[in-house]
Image (cartoon, rainbow, N blue to C red):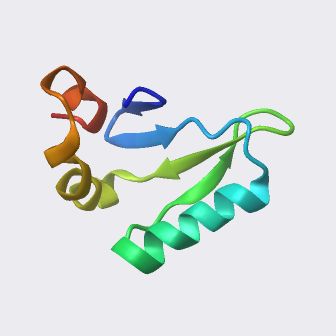
Amino acid sequence: MDDGTYSNGVLKLCTDNFTLEQVQFLCNMLFNKYGIVCHPQRRMDTKWRLYIAAREMHKVRALVTPYLIPSMMYKVGL
């Protein structure tokens, strides 16, 4: 539950050890399965994070909130 960061309405999942292709695959899966639009964001020369914009957070919250323990709600802005 703790491998990401939420700031200014934006969620970034720490996929730093994934390749660009793997992060793109995850983005495609999130869109195809849940309608969540996201994209890879370069962190360093070879590191990528999965970036979910604020306008998509209502979808993420609806999906994950039932499974979050109360102390982790801040990770999705609650």
**Front residue (pair 72, 7):** 72
Q: Residue at x 77, y 38 (%)?
A: 47
Q: Is residue 36 above or below residue 72?
A: below
Residue 12 horizontal/vertical position (percent): 49, 40
Residue 28 vs 53, above or below: the answer is: below
Tell me the quadrant of the picture where the N terminus can be found. top left
Q: Is residue 30 above or below residue 68?
A: below
Task: Give the residue displayed 41% in from the left and 42% down from the top.
Answer: 11
Residue at left 29%, top 55%? 60
- The answer to which of 18 and 44 lies nearer the viewer is 18
Q: Position of residue 63 (x, y in %)?
A: 24, 57
Instruction: Specify whether 45 is left or right of 58.
Output: right
Depth order, front residue of 57/29? 29
For the view shown, which residue lies furthest in the right direction?
45
Q: Quadrant of the C terminus?
A: top left
Provide residue 7's location: percent of width, then percent of height: 37, 31
Residue 68 left/right relative to 25: left
Q: x, y percentage for residue 75?
A: 30, 31
The vertical placement of 30 against 46, above or below, is below
Q: Tag count in the figure? A: 0
